[in-house]
Amino acid sequence: MEYEEVKKGLAGVIVDNTAIASTDSNGTLIYRGYAAEELAEKSTFEEVAYLVVYGHLPNKKELLKFSNLLNRNSRVPQNINKIMKLLPRNTPAIDVLRSMVSLMPLNGDENDGKLLEIAAKIPRIISDWHRLSKGSAPLRGTAETYAERFYYLLTGNKSKSDARLLEELLILYMEHEFNASTFTLRVAASTLTDPQAAMTAALAAIKGPLHGGANAEILDYLLPMKSTPEARKYVDGKLRKKEKIMGFGHRIYKNKDPRAQYLKERLRGLAAAKGAEKLYNIAVAIEDEMWKMKNIPANMDFYAAICMYLMKIDSSLNTPIFAASRSFGWTAHYLEQVSNNKLIRPSSRYIGMLGMHL
Ligand code: CMC
């Protein structure tokens, strides 16, 4: 039997059209026609989430309605809180998030409403679980904007500047065309399963350390480092042993991840403001050494993890925070998939035995 060449990991394979986002190897990331960095710099989270989901920037009325929807639906139902209280305290936050999303009772008939209702609740699920697991009382974010509410729910802090940096980071995490979790969601959506099940599948995929889980592992090697020579030695040692360093490399961005470079610049200012220049210099030394030794660029997770650390966000929440933002990208992809659906069911090349008989 004749087979086509197998493209491991579907690398370079175009599996469908999308009008939501586009990336390229030179380091371009576009959401619905706009550069993601420009959106991060000049827009609010709600504006970009609306753009990603509905395909155009909202007018005032649309923005107000959308912001109210996110605010109104942010509370976690009591039954879900009761289930959370039964879980072992050391359950990873991303596991709790995935499980609670799968059980979430939802209102409404429309897919976009259901998906946005889940997306709106994710910050509170993360916060409620984090507080519960530490034996602290839940926080009730009352700020009007998504980012300020989320920042308060994560830290108990009301710093406007840190909330704004979180907002920029969330905008950059929001959408990334056919990445692993989004593709997983689209496979699930293509079976015409419900939005909640598809979102649960995406949450399962984002957990892995080659995808969203990477941002939870970066501080483990970075924070113990005392100097830039130590940082360079660490990189050389890992590469010699052919081990991966989390926060580096990307399937698409072989030269530059634009999100990482944006956050690197923001980290420079943040580190100066917080007296953490040494940490910044160590991070840059790791990046430079990776590039010098193997031409592998830092990805967004590398600088996002360090920014979140300096914003006093617990690193066990890094992956759920990524998921919170990406849930708006997933919403857009679910809607796009079902609007022009064909079951995603590729083929495989059989390399097992033939001609066996009992
Ligand atoms: N550290 C060391 N070597 C690396 C790394 C890394 N982080 N990433 C890639 N390489 C090497 C890899 O060992 C291989 O080397 P060789 O050709 O000598 O065998 C070469 O670069 C190609 O790597 P690959 O894994 O085949 O490339 P890929 O396109 O399949 O993988 C990746 C992309 C993200 C899975 C990979 O770069 C990786 O595992 N990075 C670490 C995990 C990480 O940071 N993930 C977050 C990705 S960005 C956020 C997101 O979208 O989730």
Image (cartoon, rainbow, N blue to C red):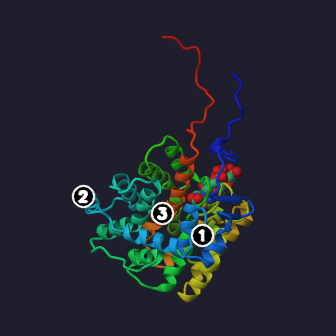
Residue type beneath disc 3:
Thr
**Residue 13 in which image quadrant:** top right
Q: Please name the residue that numbered disc 1 is placed on.
A: 57
Q: Distance from label 2 to label 3 (Cα)?
A: 22 Å
Label 3, ligand 1: CB separation under 8 Å: no
In the rendered image, the vertical position of residue 324 relative to residue 350, given as above or below: below
Q: Distance from label 1 to label 3 (Cα)?
A: 27 Å
Q: Please name the residue that numbered disc 2 is placed on.
A: 86
Question: Helix or strand or loop: what does disc 3 sit on?
Answer: helix
Labels 2 and 3 touching (C-beta < 8 A): no
Question: Helix or strand or loop: what does disc 1 sit on?
Answer: loop
Position in image of residue 141 (x %, y %)? 37, 77
**Residue 299 in which image quadrant:** bottom right
Which residue is at 58% across, 45% downward? 340
Residue type beneath disc 1:
Leu
Question: Helix or strand or loop: what does disc 2 sit on?
Answer: helix
Front residue of 87 and 17: 17
Of circles 1 and 3, the one toward us is 1
Question: Is 34 positioned to the left or the right of 86 in the image?
Answer: right
